[in-house]
Image: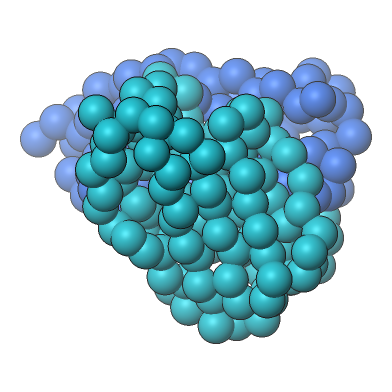
Chain colours: A cyan, B blue
Amino acid sequence: DAGITQSPRHKVTETGTPVTLRCHQTENHRYMYWYRQDPGHGLRLIHYSYGVKDTDKGEVSDGYSVSRSKTEDFLLTLESATSSQTSVYFCATRVGTQNTGELFFGEGSRLTVL
Amino acid sequence: GENVEQHPSTLSVQEGDSAVIKCTYSDSASNYFPWYKQELGKRPQLIIDIRSNVGEKKDQRIAVTLNKTAKHFSLHITETQPEDSAVYFCAADSYGQNFVFGPGTRLSVLP
C-alpha cells in the first residue's frame, strides 16, 4: 500500500465549516496528490506537491488549499465547505522519477457536507 | 492542458469473452499511460501501463495498445472472469508532473 494513510476516513460536516484532510506517507516519496472522485467524472486533480512547501493547483482547486511542511504529510483544507464538495477524496504518492512513476493511492476519505 | 476521453462508460460481457476499453488523449507530449482498476469501495490500483516508446504490452490476460499518431490507447481483457468486474480508469501523464484521468468504465462480467 506504499505506506499511505488518510484521516479521517469518514466525515460529516455542515456547510460553511472548515475541514482538513490529512495524508501521511512513510516512503519518503517526493510527489503527493489530492484527487476527488465523483460519479461520471473519474478522478480529478485538486492540488499536488513536488516537495516540501512546493505545491501547485490542479483542475478543480477552487475552494481548496494545501500545505506540505514535511515530506510525509500533505494536508488538504476546505476553507468553507459547500455541498458541492461532498465527495470521496483520494491522496496518492508517485513512486519513481518524474515521467516514469506510477501512482499509489490511499484508501480514500468520504466527506459529506450537509 | 491534457484531456482524456474514455469509452464506453459501461460494458457488460459474458464470462469468458473479451472486453475492450478505449481512451483518447489531447496532449501529444504525454508519454506515459497507466490503467487503474477500482473495485467497489476500494482504492484505484494500477494494473498495467505503457510508455510512448512501446506499441503494445501484455501481462497474462490483460494487454494495452498505444497509437501515438492517433493519440489513443486501449485496454484489452481476454477470458474475462467475475473478479474482473470493476471500474477501470485510463490516464495520461501531463507535463511529467501529474496524471489526468478518464471518467471511467464500469465493467460487468456476467456468469
Judge whether residue B19 can be spotted in this image. Answer: no
The picture places residue B47, in percent across and down from the top left corner, at 48, 54
Q: Is residue A56 above or below residue B74?
A: below
Q: Which quarter of the figure has residue B66?
A: top right
The picture places residue A34, in percent across and down from the top left corner, at 56, 49
| Left or right: residue B110 compared with residue B35 | left
For the point 68% across and 76% down, the residue is: A70
Q: Is residue A81 above or below residue A21?
A: above
Q: Is residue A22 above or below residue B88?
A: below
The residue closer to the viewer here, B22 or B14, is B22
Count of numbered badges drawn on the protein = 0
| Left or right: residue B76 compared with residue B15 | right
The residue closer to the viewer here, B102 or A7, is A7
Q: Quadrant of the C terminus of chain B?
A: top left
Q: Quadrant of the N terminus of chain B?
A: top right
For the point 25% across and 22% down, the residue is: B12
| Left or right: residue B101 compared with residue B54 | left
The picture places residue A48, in percent across and down from the top left corner, at 69, 50
Q: Which quarter of the figure has residue B108?
A: top left
The residue closer to the viewer here, B79 or B96, is B96
Q: Which quarter of the figure has residue B107?
A: top left
The picture places residue A9, in percent across and down from the top left corner, at 29, 58
Judge whether residue B95 can be spotted in this image. Answer: yes
